[in-house]
Image (spheres, rainbow, N blue to C red):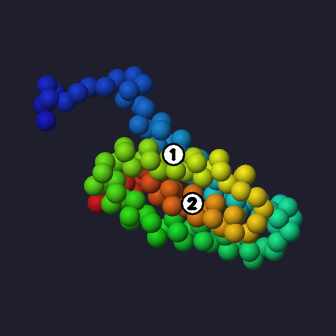
């Protein structure tokens, strides 16, 4: 391509996609890490056992991994930016709604599954694999 046909972006317009993708990835990684670090506190607060909490964490990872290719294909078909924004919005809603869902084991599982559904759409590293 010649320089005449490409649009040159500079400043914040050039770095905005990288900043958005980095922040989304940071939030997803911190969320996953906090869940693993907080296992003893979660067990005590919810009056459950470690096996149940590890089951929720495993379910989260399983749902997220199984939907990674689907999220990638959605990004290829519908546009990476559109899928990324929808994924971030769904993930954000799950993050905001989950604490108000109560302490029942079902709400914990459902909240983690909701976030696991959106996480593959938020993760930029696999959006260009198709």
In the image, what residue occupies the spot 66% across and 67% down?
109
In the image, what residue occupies the spot 68% across and 74% down?
55
Q: Is residue 127 above or below residue 51?
A: above
Task: Name the spot of residue 23 as percent of width and height, x first.
Answer: 54, 41
Residue 56 is tagged as none
Q: Is residue 34 visible?
A: no
- Say which label, 2 or 1, has the lower sequence index: 1
Q: Is residue 127 above or below residue 54?
A: above
Q: Is residue 50 above or below residue 96?
A: below
In the image, what residue occupies the spot 44% across and 44% down?
85
Q: Is residue 129 left or right of residue 124?
A: left
Q: Secondary structure at mark 1?
A: helix
Residue farthest bottom in this picture: 51
Q: CA distance from mark 2 to mark 1?
A: 12 Å
Q: Is residue 2 visible?
A: yes
Residue farthest top in this picture: 11
Local crowd at mark 2 within 10 Å, few (<14), some, or many (≥20)?
many
Q: Is residue 58 left or right of residue 10?
A: right
Q: Nearer the viewer, residue 80 or 12?
A: 80
Q: Secondary structure at mark 2?
A: helix
Q: Mark 1 sits on what residue?
A: 89
Q: Mark 2 sits on what residue?
A: 114
Quadrant (top left, top right, bottom left, bottom right) of the N terminus = top left
Quadrant (top left, top right, bottom left, bottom right) of the C terminus = bottom left
């Amino acid at each position: 391509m010649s320089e005449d046909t490409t649009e040159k972006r500079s400043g914040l317009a050039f770095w905005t996609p990288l900043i958005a993708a980095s922040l989304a990835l940071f939030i997803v990684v911190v969320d996953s890490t906090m869940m693993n670090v907080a296992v003893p506190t979660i067990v005590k607060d919810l009056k459950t056992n470690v096996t149940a909490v590890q089951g929720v964490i495993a379910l989260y990872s399983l749902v997220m991994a199984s939907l990674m290719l689907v999220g990638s294909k959605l990004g290829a078909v519908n546009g990476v930016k559109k899928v990324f924004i929808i994924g971030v919005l769904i993930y954000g809603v799950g993050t905001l709604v989950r604490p108000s869902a109560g302490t029942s084991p079902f709400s914990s599982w459902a909240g983690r599954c909701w976030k696991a559904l959106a996480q593959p759409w938020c993760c930029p590293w696999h959006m260009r694999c198709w």
